[in-house]
Image (cartoon, helix red, strand yellow):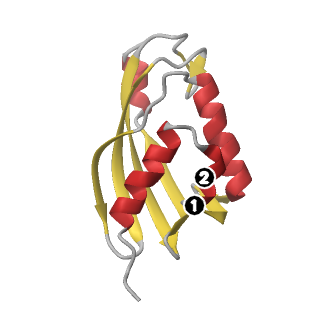
Amino acid sequence: MSIPDLAEIYRRYIDCLNRQDWDNLGTFVDDDVQYNGEYVGLSGYRAMLERDFREIPDLRFNIKFLVSDEKRVGSRLDFHCSPQGKFLGVNVNGKRISFSENVFYESRDGKIFDVWSVIDKTAVETQT
């Protein structure tokens, strides 16, 4: 059995997010997914992403770079968007901002089951 190409699976996952194709999120994310050390499950993960898109109508995930091995993906995502109201506790109120996220994923059977995310809040604060 061949090892899944996690980099390609990840690119398809990001495409799924950008299309807001929530019905197919489970193709890429395990039912028992954890986010920053906390169990959220697929439904909680989906709810978090749906909320992000409601609060940031022009949200788009842009892969700056990514590395992967047989079980893990590491990615730097760039964002250029206009969050409504507060974002990360900062009053953005629709102003267009740019920031990055460093995120690491661990997979099980080709699906994401552990996510560790760090967003550059300082970049957001310096633009408001």
Which residue is at a point 61% across and 14% down the rendered structure image? 85
**Residue placed most toward the observer, 54 or 23:** 23
Left or right: 48 as drawn, with respect to 61:
right
Count the marks.
2
Q: Residues within 10 Å of mark 1 (few under 14, many from 20)?
A: some
Does 122 sit above or below residue 44? Answer: above
Marks 1/2 in contact by CB < 8 Å: the verdict is yes
Which residue is at a point 55% across and 21% down the rendered structure image? 57
Residue 22's quadrant in the figure? Answer: top right
Mark 2, residue position: 24
Which residue is at a point 55% across and 63% down the rendered structure image? 114
| Quadrant where the C terminus is found in the figure | top left
Amino acid at dot 2: Asn
Residue 121's quadrant in the figure? Answer: top left
| Quadrant where the N terminus is found in the figure | bottom left
User: Where is residue 97 drawn, in percent x and y?
Assistant: 39, 19
Q: Residues within 10 Å of mark 2 (few under 14, many from 20)?
A: few
Residue 118's quadrant in the figure? Answer: top left
Left or right: 87 as drawn, with respect to 2:
right
Which residue is at a point 65% across and 41% down the rendered structure image? 48
Mark 1, residue position: 27
- Extreme-bottom residue of the structure: 1
Does 67 sit above or below residue 123? Answer: below
For marks 1 and 2, give the CA distance. Answer: 5 Å
